[in-house]
Amino acid sequence: MTRIDAHHHVWDLAARPQPWTDDLPALRRSFSFAELAPALAEHDIDGTIVVHTVDSLAETGELLALAAAEPLVAGVVGWFDLAAHDLDDVLARTRALPGGDRLVGARHQLQVEPDKAWLARPEVTRGLRTLARHGLVYDLVISPEQLPAATAVVAALPEVSFVLDHAGKPPIASGDLGAWREDVARLASCPNVAVKLSGLVTEADWQRWSVADLRPVADAVLDAFGTERTMFGSDWPVSLLAGADYGTVVRAFEETVAGLGPAERDQVWGGTARAVYGTETR
């Protein structure tokens, strides 16, 4: 079984500020791939997908340079201005950078986008179609209330491959999963979207979460998407906000999916990530 971590971050504050961490003391430092690597080895992780943190083409280039130097980085989900009229050219230039062959997708911080209809803007949907022509996936990082609007766009763009980050940020801490569960099931009815079981510990109570808190979310996701469209992501180092180091996240996921059969575990641990992001051909 090949194990892929489909969602983690790295950043160097000396190279690029991370203003979103200003009120998060646990994250107000640099996190390097070298710091993560021993944990990957300890937990038999064979490859990773590193995801951007800020809306910066320069950061995307830096992550691709990391991928060029680090064989364990199987793919990069970067940031691009989807509304840009020269997006075709920007993607081509980015692909020509060192590590450009590891570019697998794009993302925008939709969860904090003031325009709630941003994803449906004509210039953005044009950009999403451009991503698809380049064989790239679009990661959806959204809050639960944004799921219906995102579903409408996903359904209208069957040629685009989408991935829902962090299972749509279910309100685990409150325990009220009813609306989220229904909206996730509607999104899952679109065959062109997959999901990451990632970032769940930070949606739970940071001080006293348990695997029992995460299991209803995992069960709902697996019921809706199936193992063939579900993948593991650590969301390291953001997981540290909930006191969860890399090993804690891995062990929690192992316990959560322990009831699956061997073939199903293979899918959620790596098969889905390789198929969706195309890393098996890189």
Image (cartoon, rainbow, N blue to C red):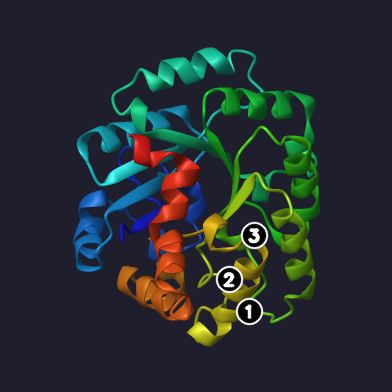
Q: Position of residue 265 (x, y in %)?
A: 42, 68
Alpha-carbon span between mark 2 and mark 3: 10 Å
Q: Position of residue 11 (x, y in %)?
A: 35, 46
Residue with the mark numbered 2: 203
Proximity of marks 1 and 2: CB atoms separated by less than 8 Å: yes
| Location of residue 123 with respect to 207 vertically, above or below | above
Q: Secondary structure at mark 2?
A: loop
Alpha-carbon span between mark 1 and mark 2: 6 Å
Which one is nearer the viewer's eye here, 222 or 101? 222
Q: Is residue 188 visible?
A: yes
Which one is nearer the viewer's eye here, 279 or 138? 279
Alpha-carbon span between mark 1 and mark 3: 14 Å
Residue with the mark numbered 3: 168
Q: Residues within 10 Å of mark 2 (few under 14, many from 20)?
A: some
Q: Secondary structure at mark 1?
A: loop
Q: Position of residue 47 (x, y in %)?
A: 30, 51
| Location of residue 243 with respect to 10 vertically, above or below | below
